Image (tube, grey):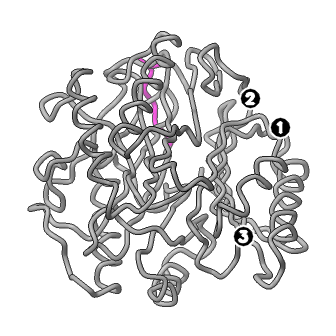
Amino acid sequence: MNRLNTIQYEKAHADIFCFDNDTAVKEYHAIIHVDDATMDFPQQLQAIMDAYSTLVENTLHGARCIFKRYFLSDSANQEDEVAAADMTDCAKSIIQQAPLDGTKVALWVYLMTDVQTGIGQSGLYEVRHGAYRHLWSGSAHNMATNSEYQTRLLFNEYNLQLIEEGCTLKDNCIRTWFFVNDVDLNYGGVVRARNQFFFTQGLTAKTHFIASTGIGGRQADPNVLTQLDTYAVAGIEKEQVAYLYAPTHLNRTSEYGVSFERGTMVDYGDRRQVFISGTASIDNKGQIVYPKDIRRQTHRMWENVEALLAEADCTMEDVGMMVVYLRDTADYAVVSQLFAERFPGHPYVIVHAPVCRPGWLIEMECMAVRKTHHPQYNPF
């Protein structure tokens, strides 16, 4: 069963989702928010760290951290401090995408029980349980001369890591995130490099792509134009993975020259995990729906996400976390009210991050999980 809970700490609060199907591995998503936006950054970061420590020690007994993402308001002045303060043994992503509630930092954390963790031989963070090894990475980057070259190098390096783990991009990678510094200028290079690299790996519109978010975001160093976060599973069979299209609502991304899947679902013996890519107000012809209307774009975005989830026999009640991206900070008041009314207590964060097409005012991504029974597959 899925449970929601909000826990108030001294200077922060955590919205928590728990998936518990009475098997060994429980899954948790928590998004931690600072309560007092007038505190300086060290105080806000400490509030986040204290809340996280108390959450793990007092509430989620035995849960191990799998992945963290810090959302920062000013990475040039904050990133080093976060990296120095957080010594947790897990994959970490640190990105400038300012929380739009006026605070300087927010945290999404993904945790599990009864798993073994460590650094794999390739440098990817490894989460082991049963027949599977879940491979995570965060904040990968390089200093090549433009976004296209940076993305190409990122894929080359990641591909070598997967090979070292006995995996391939085509068969084992489930999810990627690209954070693009000045997305209006540099996203085109990311798209070209991804399209070309995927083709070399046998990933085409006739086979499949990978669920992904490509969104505005930056590191401390302005020369880093692209940051990559990844998730892959070793030990999975291709029959366990299926792709979500919702053709009544969305078109194939290849129709407008990009290469990612709208969503991916992975079946295990005891559960189904669903990864919804960055999704905006778009129709099945690839056109922006409701230009310049943030309210109607938000509702259409929800409708698109629900259509993708429905293909996986899931609903919004199965969603464990949501990240909401806004191009215009002035839209926060409207969007915040809409989400608060529809999703009270659900873990989500609303951040400033321009979407890859200027006419899209809002985009969201999410992860979902539901109980299933597939005896032909190993449990999670």
At mark 2, the secondary structure is loop
- Inter-mark Cα distance, 2 to 1: 7 Å
**Residue appearing at x 65%, y 32% in the figure:** 23
Crowding at mark 2 (Cα within 10 Å: few <14, some 14-19, many 20+):
some
**Residue linked to disc 2:** 114
**Residue appearing at x 50%, y 84% in the figure:** 332
x then y, percent, for residue 238 = 33, 20
x then y, percent, for residue 194 = 29, 37
Crowding at mark 1 (Cα within 10 Å: few <14, some 14-19, many 20+):
some
Q: Which mark is residue 222?
A: none
Q: Residue furthest front?
A: 145
Up-down relation of residue 334 to residue 238 (above or below): below
At mark 1, the secondary structure is loop
Residue 195 is one of the magenta-drawn residues: no
Q: Is residue 258 left or right of residue 56?
A: left
**Residue appearing at x 34%, y 86% in the figure:** 295
Q: Which mark is residue 33?
A: 3
Q: Nearer the viewer, residue 182 or 101?
A: 182
**Magenta segment range?**
371-377
Q: Is residue 290 left or right of residue 53?
A: left
At mark 3, the secondary structure is strand
Q: Marks 2 and 1: CB-CB under 8 Å?
A: yes
> Between disc 2 and disc 1, whose residue precedes?
1
**Residue linked to disc 1:** 62
Prevailing secondary structure class for the magenta stretch in the rendered image: loop
> Between disc 1 and disc 3, whose residue precedes?
3
Q: Marks 3 and 2: CB-CB under 8 Å?
A: no
**Residue appearing at x 29%, y 47% in the figure:** 189
Q: Is residue 22 left or right of residue 45?
A: left
Q: Amino acid at mark 3?
A: His
Q: Is residue 264 left or right of residue 110?
A: left
